[in-house]
């Protein structure tokens, strides 16, 4: 059991920002279009008008942190005062959608347990490298780690390492802590939750991922638009789910080819159930609807 000395800095627990009456709405179509164009050029993420309210809300938070009196002043700095360069990461963060859950799309974890891991073990792999390529606040890589730790617990000599990357620095800070609101972890199978999730002892509805799992994790910022993915040795399991839908087809194909290049022979690439590999022209075998294997 774990008692926390200070509240974790998660988005859900951050006090709401007071509205500044002097702040202007992001109604300027040109300002919105310019920010959306910048984010798409830099990160490949499309920001349609339907996400204007989300973007405005996040930019309001950023302007307070950056010390600007109003959203209008902040936008003037970004768009006219040379602030695009210094605020690039923050603008991308503001435009990023970070929907995530533990054991989201459970079919993938069933296949991981029943097919992917047995196949890797049969091939003689004893140190499995896994990568969550759009990890958000961390539920996906921690879910992967729980499956790998469960396999290691019953397989002498098996070791693993999990890398979580995201373009959004704000969510990476949350993922690094491994602290979550307890209701978020209810999608973790009960037996796994009992083994790898520690409950706060001071009455707050918070949990923390077990230290043996956190010791196997690393988190880093990575832009999937970059031409090279510096993730070290070839990867046995790559999860890149529910992020390709924010890219156009040409960018999707480039990202998928780069991910496939990072796979070890016999390794697996997992994409989201709403995503397609059409047009990527990858030398991968289809194992399931959204699970693919690199031939040995």
Image: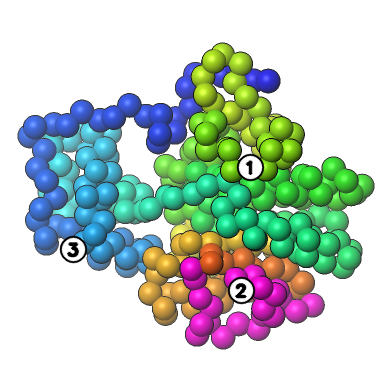
**Residue 219 can be seen, yes or no:** no
Which of the two discs, 1 and 3, sits closer to the camera? 1
Q: Which residue is mark 1?
A: 188
Query: In percent of the image, x 76 and y 57: which residue is there?
Result: 113
**9 or 50: nearer the viewer:** 50
> Given contact means CB atoms under 8 Å apart, are the residues at marks 1 and 2 in contact?
no
Q: Can residue 29 be seen?
A: yes
Residue at the (39%, 65%) spot, across then down: 246
| Secondary structure beneath label 1 | loop
Q: Earlier in the sequence, mark 1 or mark 3?
A: 3
Q: Mark 3 = which residue?
A: 33
Kindly indicate whether the residue at mark 3 contacts the one at mark 2 (C-beta within 8 angstroms): no
Q: Distance between the Cα atoms at labels 1 and 3?
A: 40 Å
Which callout, 1 or 2, points at the residue further toward the start of the chain?
Answer: 1
Q: Is residue 185 left or right of residue 122?
A: left
Q: Which residue is mark 2?
A: 289
At 22% from the left and 40% from the top, the residue drawn is 60
Report the span colored magenta. Answer: 274-296
Q: Looking at the image, which residue sits at the far top?
A: 202
Q: How is the image coloured?
A: rainbow
């Amino acid at each position: 059991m774990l008692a926390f000395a200070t509240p974790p800095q998660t988005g859900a627990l951050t006090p709401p920002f007071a509205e500044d009456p002097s702040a202007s709405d992001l109604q300027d179509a040109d300002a919105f279009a310019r920010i959306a164009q910048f984010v798409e050029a830099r990160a490949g993420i499309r920001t349609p008008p339907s996400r204007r309210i989300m973007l405005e809300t996040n930019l309001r938070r950023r302007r307070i942190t950056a010390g600007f009196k109003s959203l209008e002043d902040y936008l003037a700095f970004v768009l006219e005062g040379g602030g695009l360069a210094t605020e690039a990461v923050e603008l991308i963060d503001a435009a990023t959608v970070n929907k995530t859950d533990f054991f989201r799309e459970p079919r993938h974890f069933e296949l991981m347990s029943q097919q992917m891991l047995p196949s890797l073990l049969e091939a003689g792999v004893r140190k499995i490298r896994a990568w969550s390529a759009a990890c958000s606040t961390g539920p996906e890589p921690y879910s992967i780690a729980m499956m790998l730790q469960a396999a290691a617990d019953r397989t002498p000599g098996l070791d693993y390492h999990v890398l979580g990357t995201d373009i959004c620095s704000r969510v990476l800070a949350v993922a690094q802590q491994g602290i979550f609101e307890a209701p978020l972890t209810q999608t973790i199978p009960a037996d796994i939750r009992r083994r790898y999730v520690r409950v706060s002892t001071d009455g707050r509805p918070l949990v923390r991922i077990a230290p043996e799992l956190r010791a196997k994790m690393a988190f880093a910022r990575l832009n999937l638009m970059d031409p090279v993915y510096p993730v070290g040795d070839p990867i046995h399991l790559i999860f890149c789910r529910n992020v390709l839908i924010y890219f156009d087809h040409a960018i999707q194909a480039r990202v998928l080819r780069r991910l496939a290049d990072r796979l070890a022979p016999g390794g697996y690439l997992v994409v989201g159930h709403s995503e397609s590999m059409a047009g990527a022209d990858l030398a991968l075998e289809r194992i399931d609807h959204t699970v693919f294997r690199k031939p040995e």
